[in-house]
Image (cartoon, rainbow, N blue to C red):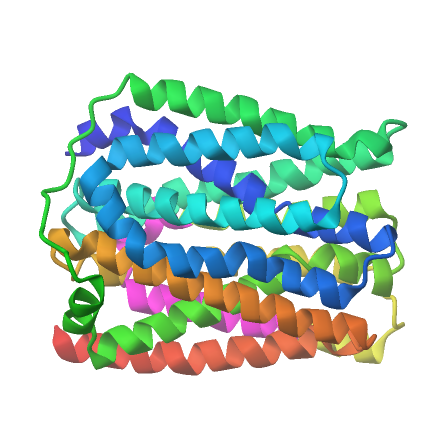
Amino acid sequence: MTTKLSEFSLPLKLTFLIFSMVLNCMGIVILQLSEAKITYDKLGFLESFKDLPVAFISLFAVNFISRTGTKNSLILALTIVGICSLILPFVEVFWFYKLWFAVIGACFAVGKICVFGIIRNNIPDEKSLAKTMNSVEASFMIGIFVVNTGFGWLISSRFSEFWKFGFLSISVLSGIAIFLFSRLKISEPEKSDQNNVFKEVSNLINPMLIIFLAVIFSILFVEQSFNSWLPSFYKNHLKVNSFFALQASSFMALFSYVGRIITANIIQRFSLSKYYILCISLILLVLAIIIGIQFADAEDSRILLFLFPVIGLFLSPLYPVINSKMIVRIDKLKANLLTSLIVIFSSLGSSVSSMTMAVLFENRMLNFYPFYILCAVSVLFIISLIYFRFADQKN
């Protein structure tokens, strides 16, 4: 199974790279459109146009993927992403961004279910699944780094007015991924009768799953606080230019990539639950240091620019580790259904986080940005402890 997985490892990683770039360009869009005098309250709801379609489409995508096939569904999603990225540079109106993110969100829902399904159907044990998931999801972090670095360079150059043409590169990558998948023969999961998706979900629900979904919601709530809003925090609170704001944020993505690669290589030596709790504890420690520096030192202390990225090292392993621990417990026939629930609560966590951050930024309460995230991580820590207690009782 491992040998076979390595054959389509590249297209899976490329798929996550592409979706990462289109999903995490939100920070750049917010930064650029805020300079075009579009208010933060409107920009905060822009995130919802990406996340809510993900939540709505995910459940129904399970039946669609079952009928169409994993490979064909993934190719269709990548095709739509490529076409949308090709069109975006030539459209100026704000409402199109809402439509664009809605379509991208729907495609991501299909794409993520397909990718998780492929991994689940090829890897049986918990730690190997965690290793593979960290490796594939690491490319998601590279996507954040690439999009921030690439667009940051474009925005700071003399061609800054053409920044949207950077999306053409995403179209090219989509074409490459489609070509790679078209040449592969992928084992499709067994088809199951899921005529009533809500009945299937109700049969799947149990207390441990509810707590797990609360953990997923909380992780994305924390992650989105950084991914879309950290550049604006750097620019508005720490008074750095747009280019440096994006580059500093991209370093957090780079640290996140390193965190997932390290996890993929060492996770088989440790208990998943202990490793996970250690990562959260280190996040709390770094945030406590940041808050101490912010309130003890100058308000615009530049050292914060270098401390925030370190959080990515410990934050990035949480999502793939907790997912792998839960997915391996689920029957292969229900893997797609569980993945759809993961996608739904991920998107809800992301959307609620962005709307809350919009309120924070609109009311110029940026002094509380690190404290706000510290509170969110503390809640995540408590919920995670409850989840692992349930999980240990099941073993």
Residue 265 painted magenta: yes
Q: Residue at x 77, y 58 (%)?
A: 232
Residue 296's spot in the image, x, y percent?
83, 79
Residue 37 painted magenta: no
Front in this rendered view, residue 50 or 266: 50
Residue 335's spot in the image, x, y percent?
20, 54
| Count of marks, rendered view | 0
Front in this rendered view, residue 353 or 382: 353
Give left or right: position of 363 versus 90.
right
Position of residue 11 relative to residue 198, above or below, is: above
Where is residue 92, by image quadrant? top right
Q: Residue at x 69, y 73 (%)?
A: 370
Q: Residue at x 29, y 77 (%)?
A: 210
Where is residue 357, by image quadrant? bottom right
Q: Quadrant of the C terminus?
A: bottom left
Q: Residue at x 72, y 75 (%)?
A: 359
Q: Quadrant of the N terminus?
A: top left
Give left or right: position of 85 versus 74.
right
Residue 103's spot in the image, x, y percent?
51, 45
- What main secondary structure does the magenta stretch of the protein show? helix
Residue 318 shows up from this direction: no
> Magenta region: which residues?
263-287
Position of residue 192 relative to residue 21, above or below, is: below
Give left or right: position of 130 versus 195.
right
